[in-house]
């Protein structure tokens, strides 16, 4: 099936047009600076042909019209007719407790997504805008929502409830949700495949390390714990997010600095993490360069980043009663041999033995042959998961309605 995968953010839309038979992306691109007069669409076709279009793109609907325009164009296109897009799959950040799997988008689903806006005020509104725009532009094309949270919905209660009054969970749905679910699920499947094992019988720790970072403990194919929580702020240190904190320090800082709720949110989400500690950058490459130049604060940032991942490896091995595989993915997880080395160092007691050369050479299996716990480096492909899930849901519906 040929699926258009959309990841709609507040001012950008990333897209891929994927053939699920071959798994290949026939085209991919991004529209940036939506809402501004200097918006840009960058489009690349499977054969490397590329084009950039600059202009005024005022909203998500116009952005998607531009994307379809270039996909249909004679010189840069990949389709002859809009109907060649068999379905559209949307990355939707928050499915709350309602959506435990991907769903066909109906008016009722849109209503539930709107009800969930409070849970993901930054992410769900642009996701909904994208869905409504496609509904207007391609009214007969099925749309599917694939949720970042769905993979984590089988977590046991002891892992998802916080130590606050239970009534607050009931009243406001305050609990651990977890994110990056498509990525954790994809690399876990790939790892099992690579090792020739059944996902149902192994304990995997996956570390998705990008600008946002999270880890998951996956036991017998089920995410039994994950580091991100009620929001994507909890857990690991990230590019600009603090990750785990003593909750009372937020109150303390708000009092001392006279911060409003919004300002405190911005401090923890935008000015903390690698950028907050180093004062240099939120980008791991730049942090590593600064470390090489002897920058002390960059070194603190690097060390804290790795130390937290190491702590969670220990904690998740304990939570699962053992460990069979560790997987690194995401921009940092896939590319930074320095981070992987620092994280895996001294973990021999858990059976983790990294192979220096394989790690440097970015091989798929980067542990020593004798390592009891293999360590893998697997590039994530969230778009492919969304495309495959979208075709599965559409085919299920087709079978039911036949
Ligand atoms: P996003 O979460 O926005 O999808 P990515 O998964 O692309 O982001 O990850 C971006 C992060 O990956 C940045 O911190 C970037 O510095 C880091 N990164 C990319 N390449 C390398 C590299 N070769 N070495 C270290 N870090 C890298």
Image (cartoon, rainbow, N blue to C red):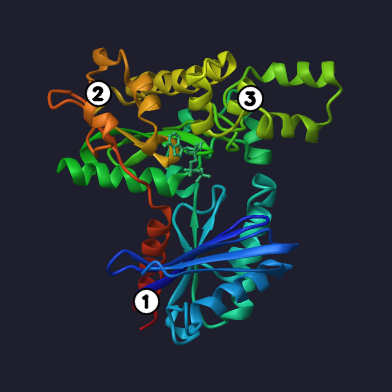
* Distance from Cα at disc 1 to Cα at disc 2: 49 Å
Which element is circle 3 on? loop
In this rendering, would 341 be left or right of 157? left
Sequence-earlier tag: 3 or 1: 3
* Distance from Cα at disc 3 to Cα at disc 1: 43 Å
- Name the spot of residue 294 as percent of width and height, x first: 52, 15
Residue 368 is tagged as: none
In this rendering, would 75 be left or right of 281? left
In this rendering, would 297 be left or right of 115? left
- Name the spot of residue 49 as percent of width and height, x first: 43, 70
Q: Are the residues tagged 2 and 3 within 8 Å (C-beta)?
A: no
* Distance from Cα at disc 2 to Cα at disc 3: 40 Å
- Name the spot of residue 13 as percent of width and height, x first: 59, 61
Which element is circle 2 on? loop
- Ligand 1 closer than 8 Å to the CB at disc 1? no
Residue 164 is tagged as: 3
Q: Residue at x 49, y 33 (%)?
A: 285
Q: Nearer the viewer, mark 1 or mark 2?
A: 2
Image height check: is 232 above or below 132? above
Sequence-earlier tag: 1 or 2: 2
Q: Residue at x 66, y 67 (%)?
A: 60
Picture quarter containing residue 218? top left
Q: According to the image, label 2 marks what residue?
A: 354
Q: Is residue 6 visible?
A: no
Q: Nearer the viewer, mark 2 or mark 3?
A: 2
């Amino acid at each position: 099936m040929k699926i258009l995968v959309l990841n709609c953010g507040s001012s950008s839309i990333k897209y891929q047009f994927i053939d699920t038979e071959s798994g290949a992306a026939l085209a991919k691109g991004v529209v940036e600076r939506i809402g501004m007069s200097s918006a840009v669409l960058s489009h690349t076709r499977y054969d490397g042909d590329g084009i950039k279009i600059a202009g005024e793109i005022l909203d998500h609907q116009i952005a998607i019209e531009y994307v379809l325009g270039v996909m249909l164009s004679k010189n840069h296109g990949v389709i002859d007719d809009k109907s060649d897009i068999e379905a559209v799959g949307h990355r939707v950040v928050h499915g709350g407790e309602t959506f435990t799997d991907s769903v066909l988008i109906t008016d009722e689903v849109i209503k539930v997504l709107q009800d969930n806006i409070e849970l993901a005020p930054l992410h769900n509104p642009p996701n909904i805008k994208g869905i409504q725009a496609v509904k207007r532009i391609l009214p007969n094309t099925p749309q599917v929502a694939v949720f970042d949270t769905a993979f984590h919905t089988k977590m046991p209660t002891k892992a998802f409830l916080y130590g606050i009054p239970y009534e607050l969970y009931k009243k406001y749905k305050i609990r651990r949700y977890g994110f990056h679910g498509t990525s954790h699920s994809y690399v876990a499947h790939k790892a099992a495949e690579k090792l020739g094992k059944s996902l149902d019988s192994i304990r995997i720790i996956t570390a998705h390390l990008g600008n946002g970072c999270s880890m998951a403990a996956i036991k017998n194919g089920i995410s039994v714990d994950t580091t991100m929580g009620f929001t994507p702020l909890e857990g690991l240190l990230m590019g600009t997010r603090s990750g785990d904190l003593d909750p009372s320090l937020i109150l303390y800082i708000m009092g001392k600095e006279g911060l409003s709720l919004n300002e405190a949110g911005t401090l923890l989400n935008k000015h903390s993490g690698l950028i907050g500690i180093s004062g240099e950058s939120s980008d791991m490459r730049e942090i590593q360069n600064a470390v090489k130049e002897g920058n002390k604060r960059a070194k603190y940032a690097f060390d804290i980043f790795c130390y937290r991942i190491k702590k969670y490896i220990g904690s998740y091995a304990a939570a699962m009663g053992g460990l069979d595989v560790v997987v690194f993915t995401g921009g940092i997880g896939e590319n930074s041999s320095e981070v992987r080395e620092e994280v895996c160092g001294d973990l021999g007691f858990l059976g983790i033995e990294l192979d220096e050369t394989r790690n440097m050479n970015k091989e798929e299996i980067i542990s020593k042959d004798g390592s009891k716990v293999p360590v893998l480096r697997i590039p994530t492909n969230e778009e492919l998961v969304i495309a495959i899930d979208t075709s599965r849901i559409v085919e299920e519906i087709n079978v039911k309605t036949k």
